[in-house]
Amino acid sequence: MAAINTFNWPVRVYYEDTDAGGVVYHSQYLNFMERARTEWLRHLGFHQTHLRDDLNILFVVHSMQIQFKKPAKFDDMLQVSNQLLQMGRGSFACKQTIFRISASSDEPQILIEADVKIACVDAKTFKPTGIPALIKLSMESQ
């Protein structure tokens, strides 16, 4: 399941993530993926406040293609993976996959697959800007 340059983040499905039937709201998957990208940056040494306050940049979602394959349910243990696919001057693309981890099975089930493009913007003006070289290097060499 884990590939080279893949970061994984665990997520537990709580009651607040679900509808009356115990199924995760489709919009919650976006939150799960956002958390995994944030924790990936933190793992690389770049906290959101440092990016904004010291480097004057933000990473924002430019676009996303998402495929819903199977639903997650209340109390499921999930793993959200983030794999860097492409790096540009002011943006990068990654593949994010959400898996259900089950104690009764060795094989995790793929629930969601998403192709995500992230743009780097100036924190004050929200205009596109280049990704700092140190961040690029960290992302590419993880």
Image (cartoon, rainbow, N blue to C red):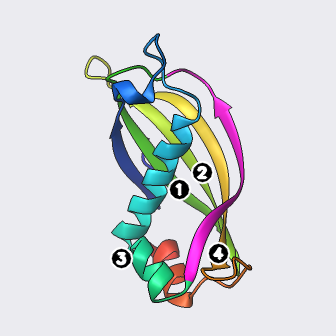
Distance from disc 3 to disc 1, alpha carbons, whole Å, reads 17 Å
Helix, strand or loop under label 4 = strand
**Type of amino acid under label 4:** Cys
Residues shaded magenta? 57-71
Which residue lies under the disc numbered 2?
A: 95
Nearer mark to the viewer, of 3 and 1: 3
Q: Is residue 101 visible?
A: no
Is residue 82 toward the left or the right of residue 121 in the image? left
Residue 117 figure quarter: bottom right
Residue 25 figure quarter: top right
**Type of amino acid under label 2:** Lys
First reached walking from the N terminus: tag 2 or tag 1:
1
For the residue pair 77 and 95, the one nearer the viewer reads as 77
Helix, strand or loop under label 1 = strand
Which residue lies under the disc numbered 4?
A: 120
Which residue lies under the disc numbered 1?
A: 83
For the residue pair 48 and 64, the one nearer the viewer reads as 48
Above or below for 47 versus 72: below
Which residue lies under the disc numbered 3?
A: 45
**Type of amino acid under label 3:** Gly
Q: Which residue is depicted at the point 67% across and 85% down?
A: 130
Contact flag, marks 3 and 2 (Cβ < 8 Å): no
First reached walking from the N terminus: tag 4 or tag 1:
1
Helix, strand or loop under label 2 = strand
Circle 4 packing at 10 Å, graded few (<14), some (14-19), many (20+), is many
Residue 61 drawn at (x, y percent): 65, 59
